[in-house]
Image (cartoon, grey):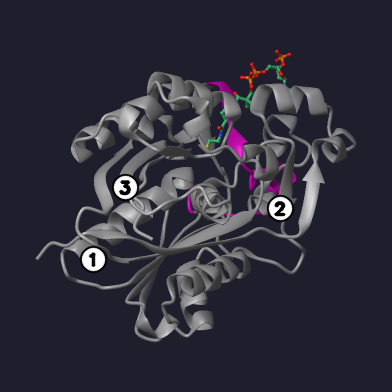
Amino acid sequence: MTRAVGILGIGSYVPEKILTNNDLEKMVDTSDAWITERTGIRQRHIAAKDEATSDLAFKAAVAALDDARVKAEELDLVICATASPDHAFPSVACLVQERLGAVKAAAFDLGAGCSGFVYSLAVASQMIQNGLYDKILIIGAETLSRIMNWQDRNTCVLFGDGAGAAVVGAVDEGLGVLGIDLGSDGSGAYHLYQPAGGSRRPASAATVAANQHTIHMNGREVFKFAIKILGRTSLRALEKAGMKPEELDLLFSHQANLRIITVAAKRLRIPMEKVWVDVDKYANTSAASIPIALREAQDAGVLKKGDKLLLCGFGAGLTWAAIVLRWAK
Ligand SMILES: CC(C)(COP(=O)(O)OP(=O)(O)OC[C@H]1O[C@@H](n2cnc3c(N)ncnc32)[C@H](O)[C@@H]1OP(=O)(O)O)[C@@H](O)C(=O)NCCC(=O)NCCS
């Protein structure tokens, strides 16, 4: 059995507290001008002391369920894409499942870095298409501020906290997911990683003192990778959908850096008017960036039923993912 599968509802949540580039100038040797020119970022949201990833995820999930007019009890599965879970285990998805009262849902987290939301949509769409499940909640949620070295200007200016969620289910024929491309190149694994706190380097006083529990990144290598892969994965997903880049109505790239988004759009010959950009407001919220952008576009009234969208991302792994879909709401 196969059926068309798409997004039935979308939700997002970002913490109240805003940290501007000017605020960061007082914390590390950086400047608003440098951050804006090199990344397009102007501010980011930061979770409150008592807010963990599952709290952000829960709020985004409630908004997505409301938007889809789906009850938590109807959900068959909850997937949460995150690189900054509340705990190594249990999964964030299990914590959210319990809080929502999604009593019949299975739940697991998905680790694909910033590509995680698009990966989750790929997994969910296939499970529904095959008839295993009817309704799946997918979430991208991060509190990267908790694993940030606030003395390292190479990383701390780039990231923000937030969550986005979508309810995935059957949609009218011809709408929903049309083409998927996923990939990974583990040879770049250590260009973007958290060195300690896992089985390779368990937590100890020494690892804490050496800041080994924070994000370590070779920014130039990740930049080169992103430039190379975003156009390529997008073209593969478009090919599977039988669509040309010029047919697209809107491009939703992972919001990491405006320069990366601009290069990807250029490769695809998509004018910037068709490219959603909100990295200035939220910075890089990793797995949350694409659903946050989708909800923002919906609230702005620019998403219409039947619109042809491309979602594409890249991230730790190194991973990449692209999905072409026709908006079904
Ligand atoms: C990190 C990134 C913004 C750096 O931009 P860049 O133009 O490549 O800058 P460079 O790495 O060449 O660094 C240029 C200089 O700026 C300095 N610099 C780095 N961060 C700075 C900051 N916040 N403020 C001021 N100067 C900074 C560097 O130390 C370097 O100085 P040096 O030449 O004296 O060594 C860019 O490489 C990038 O976006 N990479 C991808 C990161 C990403 O997307 N990660 C998430 C993946 S999901």
Label 2 CB-ligand 1 distance < 8 A: no
Residue segment shown in magenta: 199-220
Q: Quadrant of ligand 1?
A: top right
Q: Residue at x 65, y 54 (%)?
A: 204
Residue 325 numbered tag: 3
Mark pair 3, 1: CA separation: 15 Å
201 part of magenta stretch: yes
The amino acid type found where label 1 is placed reads: Ile
- Disc 3 is placed on an element classified as strand
Residue 16 numbered tag: none
Q: Which residue carries the number 2 mark?
A: 205
| Pointer 3 or 1: first along the chain | 1
- Disc 2 is placed on an element classified as helix
User: Viewer-nearest of labels 2 and 3?
Assistant: 3
Residue 276 visible in this rendered orientation of the protein:
yes
Task: Answer few, some or many: residues within 10 Å of disc 1's Cα (few below 14, many 20 plus, some between 14 and 19).
Answer: many
Q: Quadrant of the C terminus?
A: bottom left
Task: Answer few, some or many: residues within 10 Å of disc 3's Cα (few below 14, many 20 plus, some between 14 and 19).
Answer: many
Label 1 CB-ligand 1 distance < 8 A: no
Q: Position of residue 165 (x, y in %)?
A: 48, 62
| Pointer 2 or 1: first along the chain | 1
Q: Position of residue 286 (x, y in %)?
A: 54, 46
The amino acid type found where label 2 is placed reads: Ala
Q: Position of residue 266 (x, y in %)?
A: 44, 20
The amino acid type found where label 3 is placed reads: Leu
Q: Is 68 left, or right, of 23 in this rendering?
A: left
Residue 128 numbered tag: 1
Q: Is 325 left, or right, of 53 in this rendering?
A: left
- Disc 1 is placed on an element classified as helix
Q: Residue at x 74, y 36 (%)?
A: 42
Q: Furthest-left residue in view? A: 1
